[in-house]
Image (cartoon, helix red, strand yellow):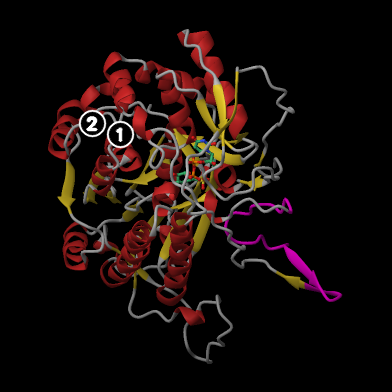
Amino acid sequence: MTHNAQKTCWNCPAAKLKGNVDFRGCGQSGRIVPKGESKQIMIECKRRPGLGHFEPTIEFQNCPEWRETEYGYLLEDMRVMILGIDGYLGWTLALKLGNLGCQVSGIDNFTRRELVDEKGSQSVVPIRPIDERLEAAKEVLDIDINFREMDLRDEDKLRDFIQEVEPESIVHYAEISSAPYSMGGMKNAVEVQDNNVLGTLKLLHIMKDEVPTTSLVKLGTMGEMGSPLTGRPLFEGLFPSDAKIEWEDKEWSLGGEMTPRDPASFYHCSKVHDTYNIYESCKYWWMRSMDVMQGIIYGVHTEELAQDKRLRTRLDVDEAFGTLINRFVSQAVSDIPLTVYGEGEQIRGMIPLRDAMECMVRLIGSPSEPGQYDVVNQISGVHKVKEVAETVADVAQNEFDLDTSIQRIENPRVEPEQHPFYAIARKLPKEFGFESNISMHEEVEKMFEVLTQERVKERIRENREVILPETRWDSQDGELGVIEEYEPGEKEMGRYKGKIDRGKED
Ligand code: USQ
């Protein structure tokens, strides 16, 4: 059965609770409901006011407002607002949702374009100005996107836009998402935390006032949890119900509590601050949110992006805004030895763009319940950095006839270079019906197809100066030396088999 077929009005953003419901009486807290006081919760449907007041028990599969798609049920013409719609993920998701019949709106202040430009870099996949992107979306895919230029922190403008659109889901991508950028001195660190933490905090207040039943799907990061040297499982944000701690001969339950965070940069810290602010808002105001702990993303391909050159999404490969695999592929294309930092034994959860977009659609279609702060670990595979370099070099050599070497550079970051990694990612497959069928090899191949196009290659070459790492976490000056350079296949890899814990099969 479709994963969200049996969710009910209780999860539906169109369900408006009748009157001032005192949730403290609904069994989720220790408050004792005085005799004679009713615990029954009634709702009105904003989409079907004719129904009057009723109990929130209609299942999505029986509600004419919910329609079945390849990713589960979605509200008909669902109004989804994407914050950060001009970015790598925002633009890609806008096209996917538009194609699925959602009414897409979005904001952006073009920070990413500006910061990349300031760095002397550019998206190596050429992208159009927003007006042309919107026109192309209309012309090629027949999607009308309601776009407004604004900073997330401009509370008046944001409030007006949210009042006007009344989104049923808000996807929050409008953050500065670079760890190296955030470690580039006081100005950058403050800018990242100001943009990310205050932007999110303002958004939460506005949502509480204007659209309290709307679900917030917020992009967090696996990096919030770090990589504990004990090998402790990286649970999905909260401890599972059977987790315990033993202390001084006594056992204590940890179930439902937030797991410890161990962020790896001031950027990752900003996501942790967001997490707590969102968690608290759900608790105080009965808002609902899904915090998405996404691994390192890579790729340039989705069905929609491939339809027309004007629809492509950006791809950054510089030291600050490029992520691991995107950087390695561009390095292979421009004959730069792949830049493995330190030992290269760092392990991370990773996910292709296509998979990440599918997960987001599934999450948008399955809102949390009122008051529920939920978390998913959004990853498709777990890999070691130096093995990723081997995979990229292998595709470069065998499919595209590109000779590639690998260099180990002194690590600009302060991070463990050898550590266990035990990622739990049970919810997306078990509760949201997601199953990844894309191998890294296959996705990397698709990247090479785009990145070896002459125009893109030329832009990567123009970016050469900003590809090597410069930003050091330890704040020291001085160039980062090359530890060694080697040929792919030359090293014993130690047979690391990254595994994700997707839970027991039912
Ligand atoms: N690394 C290299 N060579 C490079 C770039 C990175 O060896 O050229 C290493 C880094 O030292 C690190 C790992 O690869 O150990 C990942 O680096 P990254 O730059 O791909 O990822 P990170 O800085 O952690 O951040 C990226 C995104 C961020 C997202 C995060 C997910 O920029 O927005 O939150 O991935 S995660 O890593 O799971 O936290």
Quadrant of the image occupied by residue 320 = top left
Coordinates of residue 189 in the picture (x, y in percent): 39, 59
Give the vertical position of 171 relative to 130 (above or below): below
> Is 221 on the left or on the right of 423, as rendered?
left
Report the Cα–Cα distance between label 2 and label 1: 6 Å
Name the mark on residue 314: 1
Nearest to the observer: residue 65 or residue 152 = 152
- Residue 57 visible in this rendered orientation of the protein: no
Q: Quadrant of the C terminus?
A: top right
Mark 2 touches mark 1? (CB < 8 Å): yes
Going by the image, does 151 lie left or right of 360? left
Q: Residues in magenta?
A: 230-251
Sooner in the amino-acid sequence: mark 2 or mark 1: 2
The image position of residue 352, as x and y in percent, is 47, 33
Q: Farthest residue to the right: give it.
A: 249
Q: Which residue is mark 2?
A: 127
Does the magenta segment cover residue 85?
no
Nearest the viewer among 338 and 98 is 338
Mark 1: which secondary structure?
loop
Label 2 sits on what residue type? Ile
Mark 1 sits near ligand 1, with its Cβ under 8 Å away: no
